[in-house]
Image (spheres, rainbow, N blue to C red):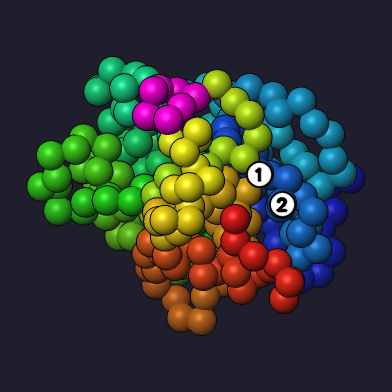
Amino acid sequence: MNVTAAGQKRLVIVGATGMVGGYAIRYALDHPAVGRVTAIGRRKLGISHPKLDEVLHRDFADCSALAQALSGRDAAIFCLGAYTGAVPDIELRTVTVDYPIEFARVLRDSSPDAAFSFLSGSGADPTGRSRMAFARYKGEAEKALLAAGFPRVYIFRPAYIYPVEPRKEPNFSYRLLRVIYPAFRVLFPNQVIRADDLARAMVDIAVRGAAEPGGLILENRDIRAMVKSLRPPNGGIQ
């Protein structure tokens, strides 16, 4: 039964088959303040949960068909993305810019009061002057989302995201970073964030909201501080 208790949140997660999105879906399903979770993606998650609804959607260039699924939602966590070098530049821009903007358009029409958590990246440049395509594209998406009219938009700009669980790394740089991570996190703690911690922060702020409406940009240091506040007193950031 699609029932939500009074006061519980109804979330949408896009990109739940990815690294961060996978943790976000698990954390959201376990969160006592979350009543329903709608996962939207191109393939099945392969999990079952009484709070979970799955919607398969192939073409994020047109999200019009998602209008009903996005109606009455309290927040969305958008984790869909692509790695630089893993796809052609034109596809990188499509996934990084066009997809979140199109999704936000339909969500805004269907749930105008929803909050929006967006997975961006360190160095994102809304001015468009960066020499790095990834930074320009993420900045362009950020700028559009902040102007989309949502009451609350949370932009997350993580630096290196540590996968936590073994996976096939997308390129040599990520393979190297995984190997040196133990030393890297000691020497440069504000340049790393665990994937599960990042997901936890993205879900938590969407659920509880910030003190003031509007846009909030969270750099890696800010995300780590959020995670620390969510941990038990004897916890710690790895």
In the image, residue 151 above or below residue 125 = below
Residue at (69, 24) in percent of width and height: 44
Asked if the residues shown at circle 1 and circle 2 are in contact, with their CB atoms under 8 angstroms apart, the answer is: yes
Task: Tell me which segment is drawn in magenta.
Answer: 169-176
Whether the magenta-drawn stretch holds residue 15 is answered as no
As measured in the structure, the alpha-carbon distance from the residue carrying label 1 to the one carrying label 2 is 6 Å
Judge left or right: residue 112 versus residue 89: right
Residue type of the residue flagged with mark 2: Tyr
Q: Tell me the quadrant of the picture where the C terminus can be found.
A: bottom right
Coordinates of residue 177 in the picture (x, y in percent): 44, 36
Camera-nearest residue between 58 and 138:
138
Judge left or right: residue 37 versus residue 12: right
Coordinates of residue 15 in the picture (x, y in percent): 55, 36
Camera-nearest residue between 18 and 56:
18
Residue at (55, 21) in percent of width and height: 168
Residue at (14, 45) in percent of width and height: 130
- Tell me the SS state at disc 1: helix
Label of residue 27 in the image = 2
Q: Alpha-carbon neighbours of circle 1 within 10 Å: few (<14), some, or many (≥20)?
A: many
Q: Name the residue under label 1.
A: 23
Judge left or right: residue 166 versus residue 60: right
Label of residue 117 in the image = none
